[in-house]
Amino acid sequence: MKKTGNNTIDTMPLEQKAAVRTALRRADVVNFIKKYTMVIALVVVFALFAILTKGRLLNPQNLSNLLLQNAYVLVMACGMLLCILTGGNVDLSVGSTVCLIGAICAQLLANTGLNAVVVILICLAASCAIGVWQGFWIGNVHIPPFICTLAGMFLFRGLGRVILGSKTVAIHDDLFLSIFASYINIPGLDSGKVKWSAFIAGIIVAVVLLAYTATSRAKKAKMDYKQASAASAFGKIIVIDALVLYYTWKLAHYKGISVMLLWVLAVIFIYAFITSKTAFGRYFYAVGGNEKATKLSGINTKKVYFMAYASMSLLAGLSGLLVAARIGSVNGDTGTSFEMDAIGSCFIGGASAYGGSGTVPGIMVGAILLGVINQGMSIIGLDNNWQYVVKGAVLLVAVIFDVVSNHKTGKAG
Amino acid sequence: MPRPCGVRKQEEVLNLADNILVMKNITKEFPGVKALDNVNLEVERGEIHALVGENGAGKSTLMNVLSGTYPYGSYTGDIIYNGEICQFKTLKDSERKGIVIIHQELALIPELSIGENMFLGNERKGKFGIDWDRTYHEAEEHMSQVGLKDSATTLIKDIGTGKQQLVEIAKALSKNVKLLILDEPTSSLNEEDSRMLLNLLLEFKKQGMTSIIISHKLNEIAYVADKITVVRDGATIETIDNAKRDIDEDRIIQGMVGRELSDRYPSREHKVSAEVGMEVRDWNVYHPVYTEKKVVNNIAFNVHRGEIVGFSGLQGAGRTELAMSIFGRAYGANISGQLIINGKEVKLKNEREAIEAGLAYVTEDRKGNGLVLNDTIAINNTMARLEKVCKRGIIDVDKENAVAEDYREKLKTKTPSVKQAVGNLSGGNQQKVLLAKWMFADPDVLILDEPTCGIDVGAKYEIYCIMNDLVAQGKSVVMISSEMPELLGMCDRIYVMNEGNMVGEFTAQEATQEKIMAAILKSDKNDEKKGAVMA
């Protein structure tokens, strides 16, 4: 296709050739903007707050906190994506699950002599149980997800408060805190002011990404498969590498790499892999795109729903542990409206409100965009209430953009 | 009472009889399909005019043009109603002139009362909001005109389909109807209710109302219609006079199906193997919601390897229900019977097991049940057997694209790339993707439900060629189609179903359209007897 296109251009008169080229370039620009709207928005918003905060946003501590404060959003958005993929369904109970699991964890650590690892396993098992509970009703009994998870929102919040006895329970267990909230510290390497381990990790990641791109391109070239041009593929990876290096350099000048960051990255990596590479992940898109056709293709749609909500609760439970460790205590209001952050991130990040489309990298951009807005406004010292107004406006604009641009291309029904 | 109109038009009108409606040279195209081609229809004031024709002949399209469902501008030709040229842009426009259409699927809201439904979108308003007293009073007035004695506050879901149909007619009366159009009004009614409805139409006729009725039931048409217009392939073929009620049903059938078969079907060596690919015995299926209703009744059939077997019948004959119930119980409740594939009896619990047993069901509803329109051709292509391009659950995207590329070439699917979203393709190409999807599942028996529905002639031919290739490979093909010529042109054997029963089996040599139609109609008459006994 491409070849013939070029040939016809070559046979044209010069002026016409130039006109066609600019037209093509303009189409490319439009496509680029469409594809990376949210990334561009993130860059713009980030630059805006960097200026408004007079560079304070770029402090190593602030950059480190940007991800750690939003760790729970990043983790839960991954699970929420699966729910939304099945047809725009959401899980409203995750904030309450955070509270319940946090409560179980805090009480076990405070009142029993159990080892922190055992407590963590109990908590994850409990969140699995919550997931099975919700997945069963939604997947097998066809209770509408909105109602089932709304019920869960009350149920789990209430249970959490009962377990806490309406008190704030503090966490002092060192092992527990070190599993979730400590920083990597390699003696010798990280003893000085600069935590070199962080930057070295950054370099390793950057090199691996570059090598992976090169080898997969080589493989495709060998098999004679179509692929994107070298400039765009390497350009993209170089930008990502630069960001990784910059970020880890900043981390190195604060406290180094947080263990929590590793947990978050692990979840993101697993979900990105599942959704983009596996048959199991493909089924979530299929169910959201056309449930009847998916069922007639021999795919167990009940199981797809079940797994979406089961995995969501598991991640909510993990978030509960992360939040408990970061704050160092749990009370009856822990996790309030977390579900909205997770849902918001997905929609801002380009997940379709009708289901069937959305990617993990996309919703990560959405989550970080929300995080930047939050943190930027906090640093400026803007009233907390205004932050809600801005978040709401951003969410609305993002979804309007999604719906309108999809209608123009005639995709959404 | 003819309305005043321009002089020039009056001349035209004068030499016509007292026609309430003249449709002139109506042509309506859908992307790739000419649904109506220069159709002419004249309806005299105060008569009952019947429209007959096969499924997809264009009857409903014609009525949708008349009622403004397809707005003025989306078709060419003139609609002259009461002597003036009308340009209806919406349903409301035509209703204002007294043209009311009642569709086959009733447009009533089950959770609302009869009165509320009757004035939906046309509410009787008082000073403040809706005047409910007036609503129910007027509703009951119109209901008494159609012989309904229920309270107007009864919910629609609490009355039977027969009465619902009457509510629709009462609703039409409330709109001051002059020309009533009924699309298959008796298709879901029992014999008694049907008769009542037809008598009601005759009663209205005495009062001077004009009706157009679309129906497959020729005995009913013979009973009620003054004139019968035959529609075939998007054109009106003839109008038969039935003022004396002496029409011969065979005469109508001949008009309905009387087209010649040319080489619209690719030739094929008929090499039917003695081996039976699939056999079904004593198959019974009940409706999934109304579980006392039997939709498939004691069906038995078989298909050999290398054979194309056709299933003929009218809409609602139970063919799709039969096929889907066989395909891993994708439809129905209380399914019983034996299913034998390649000589072994199998019990299929779900669609996955059906696919693994070597079955494929290619749905008639490619957009609703067949394809994920937002996803790419490649993704759709592998969906029924994704594991074939997977290694330990991980999709080999390159292999998947290669597979899709392969099928694109084989089936000559017209698309710039297999990464194109299926929703952007034309109907014929979507159908090819759907076929590719099921061919990739590598079945032994393919059930194709209306495989050429809504696609143009060229694409049809290519689909037929694909079918021939499949049987040449020794696969068995079951083809459900409402187009009789297509069945006659493609099949080795044809089964005929009607209302859940098997009512005939013909070999390719002995089958004719008249025989198939006769088998269906004969069984309708048997049903009448049965219905009478039951009543």
Image: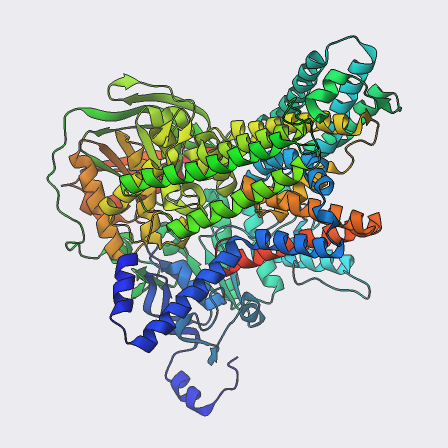
**Residue A408 at x, y percent in the picture:** 51, 61
Quadrant position of residue B306? top left
B462 left or right, relative to B183: left
For the residue pair B128 and A408, the one nearer the viewer reads as: A408
A389 left or right, relative to B212: right
Q: Residue at x 38, y 48 (%)?
A: B419
For the residue pair B223 and A350, the one nearer the viewer reads as: A350
Q: Residue at x 83, y 32 (%)?
A: A333
**Residue A59 at x, y percent in the picture:** 72, 44
Q: Residue at x 69, y 30 (%)?
A: A192
Rendered position, B436 above or below B244: above
**Residue A181 at x, y percent in the picture:** 72, 26
For the residue pair B502 and A289, the one nearer the viewer reads as: A289
Quadrant position of residue A183? top right
Q: Residue at x 22, y 43 (%)?
A: B466
A138 left or right, relative to A279: right
Rendered position, B88 above or below A207: below
Rendered position, A387 above or below B334: below
Query: From where the camera sits, is residue B313 visible?
Result: no
**Residue B74 at x, y percent in the picture:** 43, 69
Q: How is the image coloured?
A: rainbow
For the residue pair B435 and B111, the one nearer the viewer reads as: B435
Quadrant position of residue A141? top right
